[in-house]
Image (cartoon, rainbow, N blue to C red):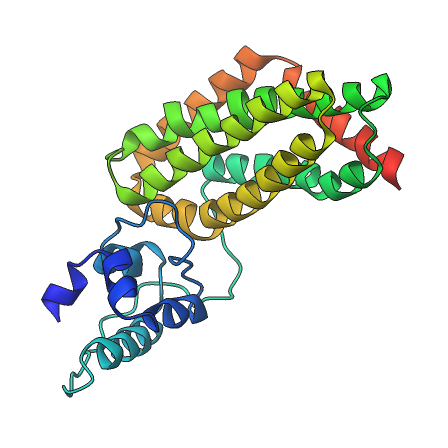
Amino acid sequence: MEALLNRGIKQIIDEHAEVGPILEAYGIGCVPCSVGTCLLKDIVDIHGLTAVQEQELMTKIAKEVYPDRDIVIPLREDTAPAQGGELTYSPPIKKLVDEHAWIKRLLAQIPAVIEKLDLSSESDRRLVRDMLDFIRNYADRFHHAKEEDILFKYFDENLDILQVMFTDHESGRAHVRAIAEAVETQDRAVVCEHLTAYRELLTEHIKKEDEILYPWMDKELSDSQIGQMFSAFADVDVAFGDGPAKHIAFIETLEAASS
């Protein structure tokens, strides 16, 4: 069983396809992951399953991988909260979750924007540019910079879960560049394609961070590190001045226009 725990999850899924749905049943979405180099043991640890859930999950995987063996998975001491319970965060991590809420409100507006989008109209082109301004300056330079330049520095940045986050950030930036270029050429199809792709990417990205990565990080960080991070985040807030407030006002205006 130790050998199985130390195997890459993508390799396991490639050899035993039914392991994918087993993981998904426990809220572990490894199948569509763009990196996929995580070890099985790391996935179980990061997702914070309860002892009973971990035992059930590993028993099902063991039966799939070793159908001719009778493997007994011991019940470990339970230290994780039950899935489905309300998540709590340290103050600096809560700041990031609150920032996610504004990004999700932008994502929620994308389908309505796409439905009515007319790039021959200067006002519609300006709307898309304003959305890109929010993404570039609030979601990326303000929010993602806190993650990449502060939070992630407390961990080994070669960790597979962090490499997934970095890859998502870069993919989002690529979508933004494609949208910006297509707006100028008034290529509606490309704009809609990449707005939709960005929405899908960030929706899953935020879910992974809020429900998996952040709770795991909070568990690993010391009280001193959390205090340092809170202070560093406050410095970022001061450095950006009233910029974030203006971006939030844009979201509120966008929502009001669509209501």
Name which quarter of the figure residue 162 lies in.
top left
Q: Quadrant of the C terminus?
A: top right
Name which quarter of the figure residue 194 lies in.
top right
Where is residue 202? Give x, y as percent.
55, 41
Please indicate whether residue 102 sits to the left or right of residue 210 in the image.
Answer: right
User: Is 46 in front, or is 239?
Assistant: 46
User: What residue is drawn where x is 49% and y is 44%?
Assistant: 205
User: What residue is drawn where x is 25% and y is 40%?
Assistant: 159
Residue 244 shows up from this direction: no
User: What residue is drawn where x is 31% and y is 64%?
Assistant: 79
User: Is 258 in front, or is 128?
Assistant: 128
Where is residue 81? Give x, y as percent.
40, 64
Name which quarter of the figure residue 187 lies in.
top right
Please indicate whether residue 192 sits to the left or right of residue 55 in the image.
Answer: right
Q: Quadrant of the N terminus?
A: bottom left
User: Is 249 in front, or is 258?
Assistant: 258
Number of callouts: 0
Where is residue 91? Give x, y as percent.
48, 37
Please indicate whether residue 197 sits to the left or right of residue 31 in the image.
Answer: right
Where is residue 22? Give x, y as percent.
38, 72
Residue 182 shows up from this direction: yes
